[in-house]
Amino acid sequence: MEKISCREAKLKGLRYYFTGKPCKPMGHVCERYVCNETCKDCHDSQVRKRNKSDNRKAYSKKYKQINKHRNKTSEWKRQGIKEINKPYPEDNLCENVGCRKPELRKMKDGTFVDLCCDHDHKTGVFRGWLCSRCNTIAGKIDENISVIRGMLSYLEGFYK
């Protein structure tokens, strides 16, 4: 292996460098990372130790909760949704124009709520991404437009 300093490796755009000297913590004689100057063996042992810890498990659980819409495809197919033809909104905003609330929020129990996949239960056709509140309201009124119009006139009469 060619001996090279960290500075020279940075100038050449390399990821690793080799000095031939043992590292201070454990005495390994191996390549080192340019970004933090730790030897690869020490770094690998730290990663193994970190992956075994409980914090890593908690992080994985939190990550899965935040990104659960990516893993829900099989669940949506079981519900009868044929095809999702719109990408998940990057801004996490509800597609109901009257709502438009961002829907990635932390609940009291520590879980995260994201947008729901709204679809017609009779045909299985995907309609869009709604926040949990709007999706629940649509389900409660059985997706009946006349109920929505009646509720709208009721509320408009009250607030006039």
Image: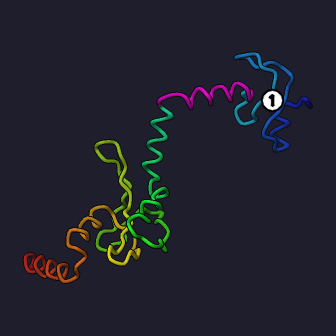
Q: How many numbered marks does the figure carry? A: 1
Q: Is residue 110 above or below residue 17?
A: below
Q: Quadrant of the N terminus?
A: top right
The residue depicted at 28 percent of the width and 67 percent of the height is: 134
Q: Secondary structure at mark 1?
A: loop
Residue underneath mark 1: 31
Q: Residue 21 in the image: x percent, y percent?
A: 83, 20
The residue depicted at 85 percent of the width and 43 percent of the height is: 12
Q: Nearer the viewer, residue 33 or 134?
A: 134
**Label 1 sits on what residue type?**
Glu
Is residue 58 in the magenta section? no
Q: Quadrant of residue 158?
A: bottom left
Q: Nearer the viewer, residue 139 or 8?
A: 139
Q: Nearer the viewer, residue 30 or 146?
A: 146
Q: Residue 78 in the image: x percent, y percent?
A: 41, 63
Q: Is residue 61 left or right of residue 44?
A: left
The residue depicted at 33 percent of the width and 63 percent of the height is: 131
Q: Quadrant of the C terminus?
A: bottom left
Is residue 46 in the magenta section? yes
Range drawn in magenta: 39-54
